[in-house]
Amino acid sequence: MTPTSTFAVVTGTVADLGYRLDAERRAGRSVGVVLTMGALHDGHASLIGRAVAECDVVVVSVFVNPTQFADPGDLTNYPRTLESDLEVAGRAGADLVFVPSVTEVYPDWPVPAATQVRVSALADRWEGRSRPGHFDGVATVVVKLLAMAGRCRTYFGEKDFQQLAIVRRVVRDLSLPVEVVGCPTVREPDGLAMSSRNQRLSPAERSAAVCLSRALAAGAAAFIAGGDRAAVEATMAGVVADERLATLDYAVLVDADDLEPAESVTPDRPVRLLVAARVGPVRLIDNLDPRAGR
Ligand code: PAF
């Protein structure tokens, strides 16, 4: 059944998406694109709002990409909330919502695309270590969805900082006609970064999850006070270790472009704090620019 929205036009085919966006560009209008896997929350709404403020026409894609799940159980359990996604996207000002089927994106499915996009090194560290193949799936589907949309500005949250770094690199390396805009993480009042995964936390785990943003704040304070990488990382790790329900995966100070450990920090070189921890059954990530404090 074709989904419908009170607010935005909904389409499911690449041909229709291309036809509509080409017509907009021919009329001199700029196109903004927000790629999502649905389960839209206020973080997504803020990306869409930014795109609406900066572009004439905004398309939001809702596609649960099967090739970026290392664990088939995660794909099966991924929340599918299309009705409310259409509502959130439309209220945030999206003009068009693209909801393709799996075979629209991968015509030979269940055989994935033979051509894969892989960003070496950047895809293997941090999140890549615990989710093998994840970023190859992300990079490949992002290139496909951006190719379907055509020339545009695309909006990604800084919350998934490694994903954003990979998308920037792919766009640059493959000379895609796309401008990538990174948008600040949207947080709950207590500092927890908004994420679709937060829905899976019990009340006790939800309280414990705030240790990630607290670790980042403590790490930023240590950095500003002149602490070296080891001191900054130990400070962050200590905050997570104090939380009984959390198990640290990594807490690191990295170069903001290539995400390599920031061995020697110079004032002109952007850096980033990254943290990942399991809280109960849920793996959470967060990050911060320690100089900007956000
Ligand atoms: O961040 C996400 O929701 C996904 O990784 C993306 C970029 C939509 C690709 O499937």
Image (cartoon, rainbow, N blue to C red):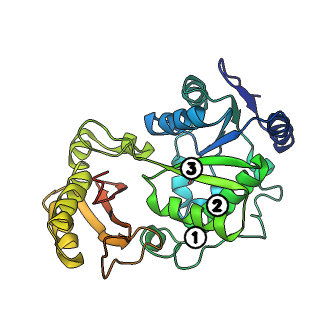
Q: Quadrant of the N terminus?
A: top right
Q: Nearer the viewer, mark 2 or mark 3?
A: 2
Q: Residue at x 74, y 42 (%)?
A: 100
- Measured as percent of width and height from the top left, residue 200 is found at 38, 43
Which residue bears the numbered disc 1? 133
Q: Please state which of residues 109 and 237 is positioned toward the viewer in this rendering.
A: 237
Q: CA distance from mark 1 to mark 3?
A: 18 Å
- On the question of residue 81 being in view, the answer is no
Residue under the image location 65 percent in, 41 percent down: 32
Asked whether 57 or 117 is in front, the reply is 57
* Residue 133 on image: x %, y %: 58, 70
* Three-letter amino acid code of the residue under disc 3: Thr
Is residue 178 toward the left or the right of residue 245 in the image?
A: right
Compared to residue 17, the image places residue 260 above or below, namely below
Q: Are marks 1 and 2 in contact (CB under 8 Å)?
A: yes
Vertical relation: 1 (above or below) 39? above
